Image (spheres, grey):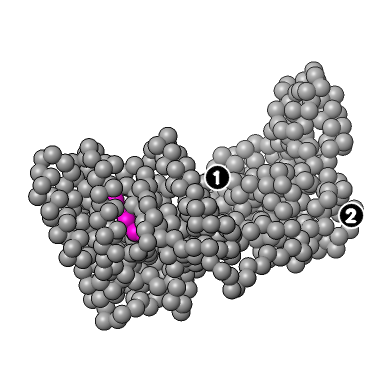
């Protein structure tokens, strides 16, 4: 006899009857028959016993339902569950259980029991995930029919925007739109996230944005906090390179080009692509083909001079002072142009040809540790004025042990007469007064001169848009500006500049990546 599959026949009933008849025949081997019908001996003996006791009726399938179900929910409980479900067709077991508990039902089944009741009564035809997929597909093909939209979104002012983004937006906008519509339709969070391939965190963020700011907040472009061109370390590295000649890095060029900047940035541990560098330069207001934004010093000893200044500042003691010195001007006292807030249809004009009311040259020094300005007015830019500035500083800061004077490479800043005067002072000062040492800036490196930042702030505050009637009026405004600035930093000591003092473009402290020189002030 051929081997059978388990109860193989036209029906299981016929297979059981064939087995029973063969097993009751003389000289039958029941275990061999079980093997032929591919059933276990226990099943075979049980089938044979039921046939002997009940005949063919014993071979029919019996109900697998338990004889008694003492823990089964009562009819009243089932009716209560079905009633809540009828009022809220989208609710599942958890929400129905919470509803029954809130309204004080005598018996509140577990959520899983409620789900079983709904399934038993045909109220759950599909799983939540299947329902979500079906509903989402219907919404994607919805042409704006209000009857197919969630009721809570029909009267919403942003309904049309959601539907427009759903139909014509890119993938991200369509996901946002359908997620909001699904949430307002009461679909389960897990089902929505599974259907749209979203994380729960992202889905909750979409819902929160829409609840707080509507469609404008939901579809607003996100600005990544990890954008490289916004990192201060990358910006500092870019300007640090631009302030040095390419020859310092073994490049046989007199000016930088983008490929070289990108390569050196990578070699120095701050990799940045062309687009990142270009973005940083553009935001800083620089352009490559205009002389007014020249950023590079051609001093062959740029690095050595820079390191010397940095070493002085890093070890500056309380009884020492470091001064950044320069001149502002000469500038004519007359009506000056500038940006101003004007009423509609109002124009401010400045005559191109004017009679000057006088001329001013301002010589000033800023002490970097205290951010205090010392200034006076000069008739010329020469060595005598630098010697005069040194004497003024010695009189004001006579309690210091040592001075450092830093200025650019103008001829009167490096004259033989000036250095002879400094040497003579140091010879007679000895231990009685402060000694003076110079820390010159690299040639053509005005962008490193901190006092330039103060001049730029002063120019924007009291020179631009001005029309002083005399030189004395202009001097009074400048004196008041520096007096108020010094008072502020005495009351609030710090080395950094503050925007309130003329919107100084960079902090008033020495740094190799500073750009103190205002491109609009020459």
Earlier residue among tags 2 and 1 = 1
The residue depicted at 40 percent of the width and 37 percent of the height is 490
Asked whether the viewer can see residue 458, the reply is yes
Please indicate whether residue 333 sits to the left or right of residue 236 in the image.
right
Q: Point out residue 59 in the picture as x, y percentages from the top left corner.
A: 72, 42
Q: Which residue appears at 76% of the width and 51% of the height?
A: 181
Residue at image position (26%, 62%) is 383
Helix, strand, or loop for circle 2? Answer: helix
State the residue position of label 2. Answer: 146
Q: For this rendering, which residue is in front, 361 or 158? A: 361
* Residue at the extreme bottom: 252
Q: Position of residue 102 (x, y in %)?
A: 78, 23
Residue 167 magenta-drawn? Answer: no
Q: What residue span does the magenta drawing correspond to?
A: 323-328
Q: In this rendered view, identify the residue nearer to me: 517 or 337.
A: 337
Left or right of 155? Residue 266 is: left
In which quadrant is the N terminus drawn?
bottom right
Quarter occupied by the C terminus: bottom left
Q: Quadrant of residue 339?
A: bottom right
Q: Picture coordinates of residue 4 (x, y %)?
A: 59, 57
Task: State the residue position of label 1.
Answer: 40
Closest to the observer: 133 or 303? 303
Circle 1 crowding by C-alpha within 10 Å: few under 14, some 14–19, many from 20:
few
Give the x, y percent position of residue 510: 32, 53
Is 326 inside the magenta-drawn segment? Answer: yes
Q: For numbered disc 1, what is the local secondary structure?
A: loop
Q: CA distance from mark 2 to mark 1?
A: 62 Å
Q: Mostly what secondary structure, the magenta segment? A: strand
Give the foreground label among 2 and 1.
Answer: 2
Position of 370 compared to 82: left or right? left
């Amino acid at each position: 006899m051929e081997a059978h599959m388990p109860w193989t026949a036209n029906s299981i009933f016929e297979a059981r009857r064939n087995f029973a008849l063969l097993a009751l025949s003389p000289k039958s081997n029941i275990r061999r028959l079980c093997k032929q019908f591919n059933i276990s001996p226990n099943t075979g003996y049980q089938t044979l016993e039921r046939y002997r006791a009940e005949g063919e009726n014993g071979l029919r399938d019996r109900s697998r339902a338990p004889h008694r179900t003492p823990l089964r929910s009562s009819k009243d409980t089932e009716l209560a569950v079905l009633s809540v479900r009828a009022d809220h067709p989208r609710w599942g077991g958890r929400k129905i259980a919470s509803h029954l508990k809130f309204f004080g039902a005598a018996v509140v089944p577990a959520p899983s029991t409620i789900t079983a009741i709904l399934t038993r009564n045909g109220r759950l035809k599909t799983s939540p995930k299947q329902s979500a997929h079906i509903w989402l597909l219907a919404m994607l093909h919805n042409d704006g029919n209000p009857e197919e939209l969630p009721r809570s979104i029909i009267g919403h002012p942003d309904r049309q925007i959601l539907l427009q983004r759903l139909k014509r937006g890119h993938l991200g906008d369509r996901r946002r739109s359908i997620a909001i519509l699904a949430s307002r339709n009461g679909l389960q969070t897990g089902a929505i996230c599974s259907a749209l391939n979203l994380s729960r965190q992202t889905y909750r963020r979409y819902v929160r944005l829409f609840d707080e700011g509507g469609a404008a907040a939901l579809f607003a472009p996100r600005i990544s906090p990890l954008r490289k061109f916004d990192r201060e370390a990358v910006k500092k590295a870019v300007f640090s390179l631009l302030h040095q000649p390419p020859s310092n890095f073994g490049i046989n060029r007199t000016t930088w080009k983008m490929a070289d900047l990108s390569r050196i940035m990578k070699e120095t541990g701050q990799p940045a692509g062309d687009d990142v560098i270009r973005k940083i330069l553009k935001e800083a207001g620089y352009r490559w083909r205009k002389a007014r934004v020249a950023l590079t010093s051609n001093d062959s000893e740029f690095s050595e001079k820079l390191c010397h200044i940095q070493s002085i500042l890093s070890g500056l003691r309380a009884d020492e002072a470091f001064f950044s010195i320069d001149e502002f001007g000469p500038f004519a006292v007359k009506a000056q142009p500038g940006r101003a807030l004007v009423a509609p249809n109002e124009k401010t004009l400045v005559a191109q040809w004017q009679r000057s009311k006088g001329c001013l040259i301002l010589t000033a020094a800023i002490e970097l540790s205290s951010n205090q300005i010392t200034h006076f007015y000069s008739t010329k830019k020469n060595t005598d004025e630098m010697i005069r500035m040194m004497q003024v500083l010695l009189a004001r800061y006579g309690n210091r042990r040592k001075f450092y004077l830093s200025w650019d490479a103008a001829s009167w800043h490096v004259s033989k007469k000036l250095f002879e005067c400094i040497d003579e002072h140091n010879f007679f000062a000895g231990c009685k007064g402060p000694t003076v040492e110079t820390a010159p800036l690299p040639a053509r490196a005005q962008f490193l001169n901190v006092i330039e930042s103060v001049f730029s702030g002063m120019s924007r505050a009291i020179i631009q848009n001005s029309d002083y009637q005399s030189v004395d009026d202009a001097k009074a405004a400048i004196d008041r500006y520096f007096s108020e600035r010094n008072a502020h930093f005495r009351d609030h000591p710090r080395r950094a500049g503050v925007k309130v003092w003329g919107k100084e473009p960079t902090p008033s402290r020495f740094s190799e990546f500073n750009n103190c020189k205002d491109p609009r002030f020459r």
